[in-house]
Amino acid sequence: MTFSESEDPWYLAYTKPRLEEVAQLNLLQQGFEVYLPLYKKFKKTEQGSTPQFEPMFPRYLFFRAKLGQQSLSTIRSTKGVNNLVRFGFEPARIQDELIDLIREMEASRNEVTIAQATSFQVGQSVRLKHNALANLQGLIQGVGSKRIAVLLEILGRPTVVQVEHHQIDVY
């Protein structure tokens, strides 16, 4: 990987646990350009499944100098940052193309609805892998972020059971 003298490369900071946003804010205040890739995750709440955004790469964020010859020595003492990622004695440099690819992936993932986040769809025939109900066949009635409602016929009666995504196969 090569960088011209006029380009400011991206670097990688290793943050303290769950302090990515603190590190981001403090690096921004020091005049760095900062990129913290986030991804959409659905969490079940009282209001139903709600989207939440979490770091795509926990404990890492990308940054580069905006002010030309800005010193990287301040990174280690920045609140929220644990250290600068290095290969040997040299700071790890990230090419713009990789950052652009991560931004594209982040944008496409963050447009996803809960229905698009899973391959299972309402009305789809499935077979259970769950130990007690192994090989029973049913229809998906609802898809959630953690569980799927499957309509089964048990003892001649229609029954809806809630199973986790990994407990069913498409039939």
Image (cartoon, helix red, strand yellow):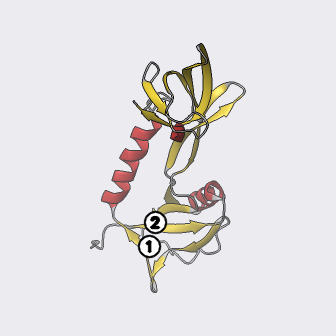
Is 45 displayed left or right of 87 in the figure?
right
Name the quadrant of the N terminus.
bottom left
Q: Is any part of residue 101 visible from this angle?
A: yes
Label 2 Cα neighbours within 10 Å, binned few <14 / some 14-19 / many ≥20: many
List x then y, in percent, for residue 124.
Answer: 42, 23
Q: What residue is pinned by disc 1?
A: 69
Q: Residue at x 56, y 78 (%)?
A: 73
* Direction top: furthest residue: 157
Write down the quadrant of residue 121 in the picture: top left
Q: Which of marks 2 and 1 is in front?
A: 2
| Amino acid type at mark 2 | Ala
List x then y, in percent, for residue 148.
Answer: 56, 29
Q: Which residue is drawn at 36% across and 45% down?
A: 104
List x then y, in percent, for residue 156.
Answer: 58, 14
Q: Is any part of residue 111 visible from this angle?
A: no
Q: Which residue is drawn at 66% across and 59% down?
A: 19
Q: What residue is pinned by disc 2?
A: 65
* Direction bottom: furthest residue: 89
Check disc 1 and report its element: helix, strand or loop.
loop
Q: Which residue is drawn at 47% across and 38% down?
A: 110
Picture layout, residue 97 above or below residue 6: above
Picture layout, residue 2 above or below residue 67: below
Q: Are marks 2 and 1 in contact (CB under 8 Å)?
A: yes
| Amino acid type at mark 1 | Gln
List x then y, in percent, for residue 170.
Answer: 41, 32
